[in-house]
Image (cartoon, rainbow, N blue to C red):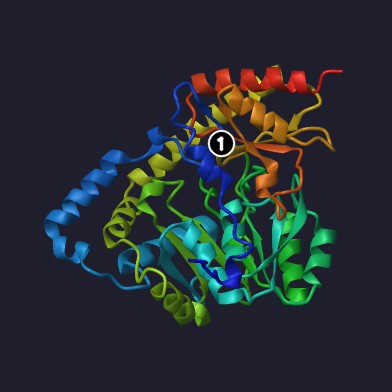
Amino acid sequence: MEYRLADRMAGARGSIIRDLLKLAGEPGMISFGGGSPAPESFPVAEIRRSAEEILMKKPAAMLQYGISEGYPPLRESLKAHLSKTEGISFEDNEVLILSGGQQCADLTAKLFVNLGGTVIVEDPSFVGCMNAFRSYGGKLLGVKMQEDGVDLEKLEVAFARPQVSFFYLIPTFQNPSGYTTSLEKRRAIYRLAIKYDVLIFEDNPYGELRFEGEHVPTIKSMDEDGRVIYAGSFSKTMAPGLRVGFLVFHKDLFNKFKIAKQGTDVHSSTLYQHVCHEFLTSPAYEKHIAASCALYREKSRLMYDEMKKCFHPAVRFSRPQGGLFQMVWFPEGTDAMPFVQEALKRKVITVPGSAFTTDPDQPSNGVRLNFSLPSQEQIVAGVRILGDLTHEMLKG
């Protein structure tokens, strides 16, 4: 039969990153393409102990339906944790437990994106969330990134447009660029949002993975009028297979978000919420985060040092202070897609910058590399292959 899909799916696109992951298991393939944390960082022993213990003590409660807003002890431990680490006040805010960070984007779009409404995003930005916004009929408007955050002049022009649903940004160790928005720009973004009455959707899945530099306060910690929705996840700090994320928002939105979740999956895994609560409140959590940061510091520095040695001098890249990603930029006007395609032939997976733009059909001079997943040996071998390719592409 001829299927008549809903209009809101007209702009939906598949994720090139998910497609590339299918190739990562091929023999001899080196993958810099995914966004996965290092498997050696997973707290396997703690997860196993916590799951076994609670299944022995309360099997029925862990395997039965749970409440939509989330496992109460986890909600309380998260409030304490976010108050301590991010300076977020819960006098007027609430937290809702969701099924991974992606559901944070889906439910926020479900509540705030009308068909044809404008969703302002950083350019480049995370493809998974952009796809969620598109699926609800949102029209994406990208604002160019600078190394210290978005271009504020262009952002103000975007904020002045009619029918702005919200501004989505990843201010700390941004995906894909790895950039961190400066404190000055965070304050300016919040002031502009007040001036033009724009909602801010702040995504912070990588914030705890800082291995260099000083902590920068979240925009949510500056929020005085409930206009910042804050998303987080345990996918990068514990393990993505747990599928536990969370949203923080003004308490007036609590019932609306809860109802939106009930229409999607009723509730998130009670068992894995318990595991996250137990680990988050354990002294082992801080040690685990410190060990993860040390691991990523070593891998990031190795990739950076190898790129300095191997890449053509016309290729630029910054040194990340945290997170999982390193962005590479070819000279302006260069289409990086041939580089990505040729690298794949040489058994190295990268992601073209065009995948992270509001119009992925347009060429981009950027390429995203992930340093968390590959081994040190793979980082050295892969960067050398890519380095040779940069010289071949830019010779003369």
Tell me which amino acid carries mark 1: Gly
Q: Is residue 245 left or right of residue 164?
A: left
> Between 152 and 316, which is closer to the camera in this rendering?
316
Instruction: Using the rendered image of the protein, determine whether residue 115 is visible from the camera's viewpoint.
Output: yes
Residue 308 higher or lower than 209, as above or below: above
Residue 262 sits above or below residue 284 on the image: below
Residue extending farthest to the right is 396
Residue 257 in percent (x, y) is at: 47, 75
Q: Is residue 56 left or right of residue 152?
A: left
State left or right for residue 28 relative to residue 154: left
Q: Is residue 5 above or below residue 37?
A: below
Q: Residue at x 39, y 40 (%)?
A: 287
Q: Is residue 121 above or below residue 379?
A: below
Q: Position of residue 196 (x, y in %)?
A: 77, 75
Residue at the outermost front position: 1
Q: Position of residue 55 (x, y in %)?
A: 16, 55
Q: Quadrant of residue 319?
A: top right
Question: Of 117 and 155, which appears nearest the observer?
Answer: 117
Q: In the picture provided, is 59 more to the left or to the right than 328? A: left
Looking at the rendering, in which quadrant would you find the C terminus?
Answer: top right
Element at label 1: loop
Q: Position of residue 379 (x, y in %)?
A: 55, 23
Q: Which one is in front, 174 or 128?
A: 128
Identify the residue shown where x is 73% and y is 74%. Answer: 194
Residue 203 makes an appearance in the image: no
Give the residue at mark 1.
33
Please tell me how crowded label 1 is: few (under 14), some (14-19), or many (20+) other residues with Cα within 10 Å. many
